Amino acid sequence: MISGDRFSAVYRITGSEKEAYGKAKDLCLEETVEFPEELVPSGMISEQIIGRIESFESILFDSGLVKPNGLDQYRAVISYAIETTANELTQLLNVLFGNISIKPGFYLEQINLPQSSLENFKGPRFGREGLRNWLEVQGRPLLFTALKPMGLSAGELAEMAYKLALGGIDIIKDDHGLTNQCFAPFTDRVQLCAKAVQKANEETGQNCIYVANVTAPSNEIFSRAKLARDAGARGLMVAPGLVGLDTMRQLADDDGIALPVFSHPAFQGSYVTSRENGISHYALFGQIARLAGADATIYPNFGGRFSFSQAECESIARGTAISMGHIKPIFPSPGGGMSLDRVPAMLQVYGPDVIFLIGGGLFKHGPDLVQNCQYFRRLAEMYLKDQ
Amino acid sequence: MISGDRFSAVYRITGSEKEAYGKAKDLCLEETVEFPEELVPSGMISEQIIGRIESFESILFDSGLVKPNGLDQYRAVISYAIETTANELTQLLNVLFGNISIKPGFYLEQINLPQSSLENFKGPRFGREGLRNWLEVQGRPLLFTALKPMGLSAGELAEMAYKLALGGIDIIKDDHGLTNQCFAPFTDRVQLCAKAVQKANEETGQNCIYVANVTAPSNEIFSRAKLARDAGARGLMVAPGLVGLDTMRQLADDDGIALPVFSHPAFQGSYVTSRENGISHYALFGQIARLAGADATIYPNFGGRFSFSQAECESIARGTAISMGHIKPIFPSPGGGMSLDRVPAMLQVYGPDVIFLIGGGLFKHGPDLVQNCQYFRRLAEMYLKDQ
């Protein structure tokens, strides 16, 4: 009944050596049987179902790393029988970080899934290569912006989309706070914006796509996605923190929709704000977003108005491309309070396989929105010329 | 186009007075227009859509409260136009705590919704009174336990359910890690467990209910819920951290299912592990769980193997019952590493309107599971006699 195949996860555990080892043992029970150890039936359950400590070592803080709150930390690799997950993303997440999310001093750094686990997931439909082909853009960073602010009418947002597309942006999305407000109801907005982008494409000969935000009540997500597709939207954005990671997976897997999926980090921040509790940037915005079907993972760039460090952002980029069997690499999409001036520096860090999300900064750069976009485009194209 | 009705939220903001006030102003933009203030169109958007600071005051740490990491904190009440939420729970949560979840030093303490917001939500179908009537138990705490450990067969779990019901437990649920594993597939487990509880009820004349865990891939939650209902399950459990809060809302609202909903906190812990970032216990496990349709909110009790304080647990209990228009009061359901010895002390804290969730502790108390349950029942009934 048990294959013997196991997946594993790397945890950072806070406490003295004795405390941390006790916590690692507790984790093995808590995430699987949730039962007093002495009462666990011997045999398969005690030998296979309970998590297993594969390694346990001190984290060395001598190379510039700083102890969080001055506390010691240990790194434990814990393995679990693949059967504990029932081949479900929801239950995989539950085993990895369900109950221990509630306990202090547990931090999920990384997950390692064998092929027998990975084969339960399709991952992103497009991935980096597929999205480049969808956009017909090779070799340079992709340009991404958002329609805002909330309160504009559908017609005003569409007019903005038209200018942004005319200026050479590759991907234009709804701001993540635009859902179905009375100012710009979903159906009107999506129809007008998709049409506006199409009109600009006809004039420029380019291939800009409009991405509709389908973060919505759970019983409306799929109808909105289909409506967006029928209206000419050529991508979808969703915030898995608000709708559930597995809903994003279902959206990506749906052959009747079959559009690129952009993952937005709203309501997920609390997982990554502490170094003692939570999930690493690498695992959450890299590995897990990918497993859950995102073709691009949006996150706040370092140096913007958010607080991610450069190292954390680089770790996300690594997580988007690290080998995960048949699960395709996806695009990191740093954004949030970025200005155009920072594009060259970001190119140094990310290279060409990145989607630059610039919202407000694109509007601030100068009075003419089309010219601002053209400038943004030239910055990205410099990368091609430099090669 | 704008009604003028506003909802508000109380935030705790970390920093010096100047920093904290700047953060409060930033929050007003970030959660609504996400746009540089100087570019926000004047008129309705600048006057109504942008969040508004209604009050801002220092948090006094003189009455035994401890400053987190020695930092100052301020309390700001921010109001938003009700139209920003599009009458959606997902977008309400996004306005309350979407992007600022990613920024350091923002903590959501409490939400205040006017009737014009509340009327968009049905809330719990049963609530305290409805669940008491469903169980036919008045005046005393309700007794709740879980089938475990993972790895037992459906038949073994059903045998366990039979004994628990025979011993006088009111509510028997799947452990939250039991989904559709090969050891005890969902359909088999639910059919056998529902039948076993029914058999015990026929013998005891009592009215124990079996609650099926429907935390599952998003495209299977509703089919499992219907299957469970048809099989005789008389309640459902779901972990909104894994499936999305609005999915729980949809489950509660579904007239074809119409079963009590028990909310499990797995994967939600990271929201409440810090006093500087996240959401308060009161708001997340009290107000928000209720708004999202839970009839009972499960959370780790103080003094068990988790780390919630007594004050935090009491705040959850307050959140389950505080006046929220037509949204019914729900049951707090403390559990997690509890032993039977603690029942009398918990009665002092919670009073009779509580669901005691005892898992492993019920099995540990003595060798005979039925007798352990009978003892648990006597402890709860003492409350009635004492009155």
Image: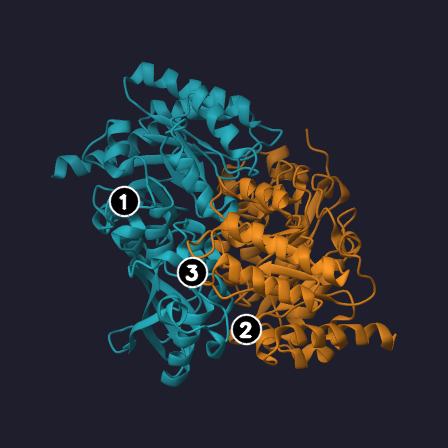
Chain colours: A orange, B cyan
| Mark 3 vs mark 2: in front | 3
Q: Circle 3 is placed at which residue position?
A: B95
Q: How many neighbours does mark 2 have within 10 angstroms: few (below 14), some (14-19), or many (20 or more)? A: some
Chain bearing mark 1: B
Q: Circle 1 is placed at which residue position?
A: B327
Pointers 3 and 2 within a single chain: no
- Could you tell me how many numbered marks the image carries? 3
Give the quarter of the image for residue A211. bottom right
Q: Amino acid at mark 2?
A: Phe
Q: Is residue B236 at least partly visible in the picture?
A: yes
State whether residue B200 is above or below residue A126: above
Residue closest to the eye, B254 or A148: A148
Residue closest to the eye, A263 or B273: A263
Q: Is residue A211 at least partly visible in the picture?
A: no
Q: For numbered disc 3, what is the local secondary structure?
A: helix
Residue closest to the eye, A299 or A193: A193
Q: For numbered disc 2, what is the local secondary structure?
A: loop
Give the quarter of the image for residue B308. bottom left
Of pointers 1 and 3, the one earlier in the residue sequence: 3
Chain bearing mark 3: B
**Residue at left offset 44%, top offset 71%:** B29
Q: Circle 2 is placed at which residue position?
A: A306
Q: How many neighbours does mark 3 have within 10 angstroms: few (below 14), some (14-19), or many (20 or more)? A: many
Q: Quadrant of the C terminus of chain A?
A: bottom right
Chain bearing mark 2: A
Gap between marks 2 and 1 measured at Cα: 36 Å
State whether residue A36 is above or below residue B136: below
